[in-house]
Image (tube, rainbow, N blue to C red):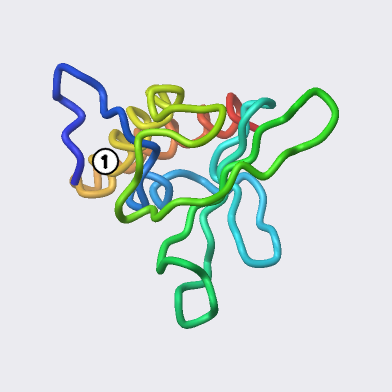
Amino acid sequence: MTNRYSFLPSRQLPNTEQLEAMPTLLQAHTCDMKFNDGEVRLFLSRCDSRDGEPFDNTVYLEIFDGRNWIDQGYYDGDNPIDCMPGVTGTYFTDFKVDADRAIELLLAEEDDRLALQALLNSIVRGNG
C-alpha cells in the first residue's frame, strides 16, 4: 500500500490500487473511467495481458485539446511512471491522496464505512 503520510507526494501517475479504490465515473466497453476533470481522463482496463492488453493493469490517459480528447498513451498501473506527454504524476496529487484515504478506510473497521461512503460520494460529485 502507498504511504499517504510521506512528506513528499508521489511523483508517479496513479497506481492500480489507487484507481481500483476510486469510484467508476463511466464504464466503457473494456475500461472504467476513474478520473475526469475536464482536461485529463484516466481509464483502468478491465482486461489483462491474456486479453491482448500490454499489461495486466493497463491505464489509459487522454487530454482534452479544447475540441477533442487526444489519446496520450498508456502505462502499467502496477509500475506507474512519473509522466506522460502533457501531464506529470503530480497533476494527480489530490486524487492520489483521496484514493489512499479510500484504501485506508476500506481496510478499516466497519464503523468507518460510512466515512468512506461520504468520501466517495463527494469525490464523484467533484470529479464527474
Looking at the image, which is closer to me, 53 or 104? 53
Residue located farthest toward the top when viewing the structure as drawn = 7
Quadrant of the image containing the C terminus: top right
Residue 68, image quadrant: top right
Q: Tally the numbered discs.
A: 1
Residue in the image at 25% along x and 22% along y: 9
Q: Residue 53's x, y, as percent? A: 52, 70
- The residue depicted at 61 percent of the width and 42 percent of the height is 72
Could you tell me which secondary element the residue under label 1 belongs to?
helix
Is residue 88 found left or right of 70 in the rendered image?
A: left
Q: Quadrant of residue 88?
A: top left
Image coordinates of residue 28 in percent, x first then y, are: 69, 59
Tell me residue 103's x, y (percent): 28, 44
Among all residues in the image, which is located at the extreme bottom? Answer: 50
Percent x, y for residue 41? Answer: 61, 38
Q: Is residue 87 left or right of residue 40?
A: left
- In the displayed orientation, state which residue is furthest to the front: 85
* Vertical side of 77 occupied by 49: above or below: below
**Considering only vertical position in the picture, is 25 above or below 29?**
above
Mark 1 residue type:
Leu
Residue located 35% across and 42% down the image: 81
Q: Quick check: 72 above or below 53?
A: above
Residue bearing the label numbered 1: 105
What residue do we see at 38% from left, 23% from top? 90
**Residue nearest the viewer, comparing 48 with 116:** 48
Label 1: few (<14), some (14–19) or many (≥20) C-alpha neighbours in 10 Å: many
